């Protein structure tokens, strides 16, 4: 049975969307822009980055658009002073949490974190930088993992599980100590489940996962390949 | 018309921001007619003057000497600008921040040296534990990120200030 059509309002405009769609999906289909960072089309949404927060009438707290299914009659606001304020804080906290040295990064100029900051006009942050001591895993023959540049969006975890089915990546520890880990916290190069497919590298929005041998600005990710692969699989299924 | 007093300062940075400042081509000629460059690596003044209108500071704050300089500059400047990523975020100089200073100096000047294996102490200011952005020490009025910030952006900001405007919102900003 085809999905029921629901009527919702986004920024006052009446649109119809399918039952089961998230606010973000409904917005995208109708050409409404909501900023995202951890979202990647086709992967299971997790609401990790809080950039896609929106206001929903009747609910006081801000809601992540990527994980919230639409309901009939829902009224969504995607832009407001309150949303801009909170999105900015989320983004600034990502910058201070780790060591994002754009000038020395392989993804400089092609980084989703960096370009989102530019789009939001962020010229400085209001918090003190954390400057944590973090490692780099160079044990894989083709790829590297630099925790300094990781924003814990878990795209790598999800693309490895959802698309490749290898389940190499997981999260370990909590809060400020949270890290991406391969297998049972082994070095990536020692992972026996990794198929060396590189999907995690392409899905990563920053330079945290990159191909070895890239100089500054040379790592260009192809997230569109990931999304089109997922689409084709869905058609087959 | 009274010329606007502009100073530039070079803390812990590579001087790339100053290069970018000079890279504004012909714009520098018309700008030079409206400003008075009163202090900086490009001029010969020894003491930071009083009552400066605009100061552009390049580099992170890395030593106690930097802190003292910066505090004096803040007192004597109406509008303080963080010029470039090192001044705004710490950037490359801050990559040393998770390494203890003595270990760092030992590694570079003793273990890493071919000859003259000694950590320099004479005539160089002692390093702070960490290199940090200006904003964490003094009030900063405007931030121009970039490594370096594009010459056009620097030119636009100074021209605006000369014309009595402070216009951050309209600037295209980018870290790195």
Image: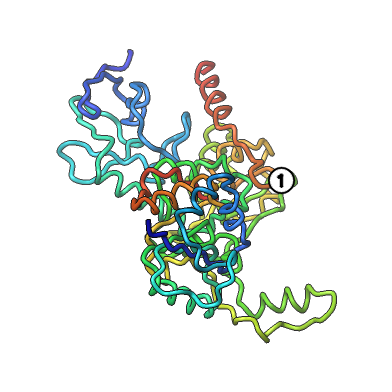
Q: Which residue is mark 1?
A: A212
Query: What percent of the width, then of the height, locates residue B86?
Result: 54, 61
The quadrant holding residue B25 is: top right
Q: Nearer the viewer, residue A87 or B50?
A: B50
Residue B86 vertical position relative to residue A28 in the rendered view, above or below:
below
Residue B28 vertical position relative to residue B101 in the rendered view, above or below:
above
- The outermost residue toward the bottom is B122
Query: What percent of the width, then of the height, locates residue B83?
Result: 50, 58
Residue A197 vertical position relative to residue A180 in the rendered view, above or below:
above
Question: Which residue is pictured at 46% across the width and 74% down the height?
Answer: B49
The quadrant holding residue A201 is: top right
Q: Chain of mark 1?
A: A
Residue B18 vertical position relative to residue A140 in the rendered view, above or below:
below
- Give the number of marks: 1
Residue A173 visible (yes or no):
no
Q: Nearer the viewer, residue A81 or B148?
A: B148
Residue B74 visible (yes or no):
yes
Question: Which residue is pictured at 54% across the width and 49% down the height?
Answer: B29
The quadrant holding residue B17 is: bottom right
Compared across the picture, whether A63 is left or right of A175 comes to left
Query: What percent of the width, then of the height, locates residue A177?
Result: 48, 62
Question: Which residue is pictured at 38% across the width and 59% down the height?
Answer: B2
């Amino acid at each position: 049975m085809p999905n029921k059509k629901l009527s919702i309002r986004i920024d006052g405009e009446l649109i119809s969307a399918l039952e089961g769609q998230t606010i973000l999906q409904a917005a995208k289909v109708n050409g409404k822009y909501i900023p995202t960072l951890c979202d990647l089309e086709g992967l299971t949404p997790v609401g990790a980055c809080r950039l896609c927060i929106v206001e929903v009438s009747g609910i006081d707290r801000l809601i992540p658009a990527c994980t919230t299914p639409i309901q009939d009659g829902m009224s969504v606001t995607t832009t407001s002073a309150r949303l801009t304020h909170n999105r900015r804080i989320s983004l600034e906290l990502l910058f201070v949490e780790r060591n994002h040295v754009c000038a020395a990064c392989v993804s400089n100029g092609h980084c989703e974190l960096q370009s989102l900051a530019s789009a939001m006009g962020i010229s400085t942050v209001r918090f003190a930088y954390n400057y944590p001591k973090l490692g780099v895993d160079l044990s894989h023959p083709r790829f590297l993992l630099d925790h300094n540049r990781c924003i814990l969006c878990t795209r790598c975890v999800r693309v490895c599980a959802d698309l490749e089915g290898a389940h190499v990546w997981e999260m370990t520890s909590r809060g400020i100590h949270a890290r991406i880990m391969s297998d049972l916290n082994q070095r990536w190069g020692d992972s026996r489940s990794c198929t060396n497919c590189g999907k995690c590298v392409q899905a990563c929005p920053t330079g945290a996962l990159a191909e070895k041998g890239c100089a500054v600005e040379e790592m260009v990710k192809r997230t569109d390949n990931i999304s089109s692969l997922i689409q084709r699989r869905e058609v087959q299924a | 018309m009274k010329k606007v007093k502009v100073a530039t300062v070079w803390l812990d940075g590579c001087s790339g921001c100053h290069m970018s400042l000079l890279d504004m081509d012909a714009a520098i000629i018309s700008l030079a007619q409206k400003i008075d460059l009163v202090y900086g690596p490009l001029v010969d003044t020894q003491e930071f003057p009083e009552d400066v209108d605009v100061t552009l500071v390049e580099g992170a704050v890395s030593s106690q000497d930097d802190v003292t300089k910066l505090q004096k500059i803040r007192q004597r400047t109406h509008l303080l600008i963080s010029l470039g990523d090192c001044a705004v975020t710490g950037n490359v100089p801050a990559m040393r921040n998770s390494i203890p200073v003595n270990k760092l100096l030992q590694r570079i000047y003793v273990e890493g040296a071919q000859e003259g294996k000694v950590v320099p102490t004479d005539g160089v200011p002692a390093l702070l534990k960490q290199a940090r952005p200006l904003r964490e020490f003094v009030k900063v009025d405007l931030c121009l990120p970039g490594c370096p910030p594009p010459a056009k952006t620097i030119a636009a900001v100074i021209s605006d200030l000369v014309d009595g405007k402070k216009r951050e919102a309209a600037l295209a900003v980018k870290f790195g």
